[in-house]
Image (cartoon, rainbow, N blue to C red):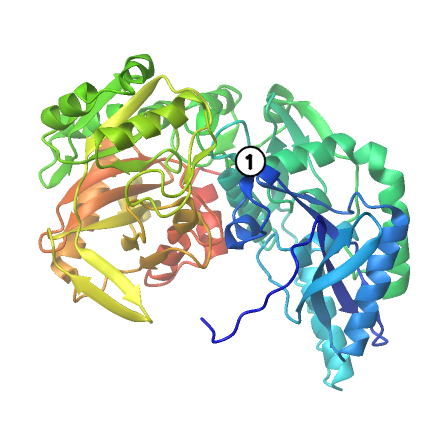
Amino acid sequence: MDTRVVIEPFMEGKEFTVIVLQNSFGIPVAILPTEIEMAFHEGRIFDFRKKYLPTNQVKYHCPPQFSDDIVEKIRRQAEQIFSMYGMKDFARFDGWVINDSEIRFSDFNTISGMEQNSFLFQQASRIGMSHGDLLKYIVKNSCKRQKIDFPEEVKKGSNLKKKPVRVIFGGKTSERQVSLMSGTNVWLKLRKSDIYESKPFLLDFDNNVWELPYSLILNHTVEEIIENAKNAERNQGRIARLVGVVLEELKLEKGEYSEPFFVPKKTTLANFIKESKFVFIGLHGGMGEDGTIQKLLAESGVKYNGSDSEVSRLCMDKFATGEFIRNAAIEGVTIATQKVLPFNKIKNYLNSTALWDELTQELDAKTLIVKPKDDGCSTGIAHLYTHVDLGEYMKHMVRCDSHIPAGTLKNQENILEMPGSILRDVLFEKFVETDNVQVKGNQLKYKRVSGLVEVTIGILEKGLPASKAGKKLHALNPSITIAEGEVLSLEEKFQGGTGVNLTPPPKEIVSPKALANAKSLIEKLGEKIGLQGYARIDAFMNVKTGELSVIEVNTLPGLTPSTVLYHQGLAEDPQILPKELLELIIKNAGY
């Protein structure tokens, strides 16, 4: 990585980060700092995973829990550093508060990260600036500094009233943080729609629904947002005072901050549904995917995205989906051999080889895949090599641990996220060996092993011409998914900059004929199951024939910024842009 290293004291203090903007007069102004609180038992290094993947290992407080005097001191010192180095436009500084009094800066970033909920946008949202407001402000001031004409914004007039869309995310499931990423991304993209007007809503752990202001949505975890929503009224006075100082120093003009704060509004799920015309379900796992919320919405005559309650319930249960596929007998479509065991039976075999021997013999397998039978698609999935791995996995399952530390299981390089609750049933499958596909140094390396590659294929329901009344499922171009470890990690599935997806599959790996056959088989399977609107199917694909061995069917696939559905939409001819893809999903629901 480098020929030199930096050694510095370990800071026994409280970590913070602060954004500095240059106002229209060229004067640096620090926004409200964010305090970074890390769980001591998880290790106290704010590493890549803690920064960019939602996790309860980290909590953000903006404004921080420091005294107002310390907040002011951080802001002024950050502004001095900005000026001292001759920085321009914006920057981010990280540092520490030691013994609640001494401030030490540790890292200077001349270009801050710009993910949808990065510190740059979080802190700007606290003073009422949307993503667009902030970026426009930075570019406008930069143009002024460099004597470049800044074009006036052309506002498109429309006599059409936008249709209201309520985006709901969160919930009490192991996939609630992915749901937050998905729901927030859907809401932000639909803000640019000329057809729909989106509003964000958070489902809490007691099935209450919160309408939230812009400034409280960009935190990394559902828990943080719920806590901020509950304390918003109590903290309103302090926040208004701190924000007032920043706004005065930034000299913002009218229209440069478009998202005023309001106290979050809480209602029941029943009232939320009653007051809705269309609900975009951004929930993952639990009631979002098992058909519960679909049934409630349908009974109230409210339209929603995705499949109905019966199809959702079927696809949530991975074993039931397997049985359906086996009985459907579609030529060219199979599913791995499976075995479901009640959780209560498994936990009695923690120190015995008997269960391992029973499973490997029945499934005709040397090694096994284990996963929750009726949870979402992101947690608790592991490759087990021996009865020792099985025992370790079940110990963590029995304790309802949030994750299994890296290195606990054989060849387990990363943390394995777990459901965090006791499951009724656990599903075991025969491990399927795939061809070796890697991307090293921007070079594709492929080695044939079994003739199978793991793919994920999006499905869209498309309306047919009037002469052919009705709708038909259309398979998008498949993506080859590349896992660095034994199975796809949570980061590789949903976090930008981590996983690698090849969309569409390179011709040197999958022939066009095999690709066309795979898409045809996916459409047949989707029609047979009764998928509606859109979906995603994961499978092993034969690179020569396109035949499929299905892994799972997702009726509410993730829609995070880096989801393969957006990649696959862009690979269409003509291409489907991300916002257009979301609009199409809503239109497919008849809204």
Dot 1 alpha-carbon crowd within 10 angstroms: few under 14, some 14 to 19, many 20 or more: many
415 over 112 or under it: above or below: above
Q: Secondary structure at mark 1?
A: strand
Nearer the observer, 231 or 436: 436
- Give whichever of 183, 13 is nearer the camera: 13
Would you say residue 55 is visible in this rendering?
no
Percent across and percent down for residue 382 are 31, 37
Q: Residue at 79% of width from left, 65% of height from top?
A: 78
From where the camera sits, is residue 310 visible? yes
Q: Residue at x 51, y 44 (%)?
A: 182
Residue depicted at x 46% and y 23%: 421
In this view, 360 is above or below 438 = above
Q: Position of residue 451 (x, y in %)?
A: 11, 53
- The residue wearing badge 1 is 169
On the image, the x and y values in percent for residue 372 come to 34, 27
Is 343 located above or below residue 532 in the figure? Answer: above
Residue at the location (41% across, 37% down)?
556
- Classify residue 551 as left or right of residue 46: left
Please tell me which residue lies in front, 353 or 181. 353
Dot 1 amino acid type: Phe
Q: Quadrant of residue 501?
A: bottom left
x and y percentages locating residue 408 in the rendered image:
36, 38
- Position of 242 with respect to 160 (left or right) is right
Residue 103 falls left or right of residue 534: right
Q: Total number of numbered labels?
A: 1
Give 311 or 405, whichever is nearer the viewer.
Answer: 405
Question: Which quadrant: the N terminus?
Answer: bottom left
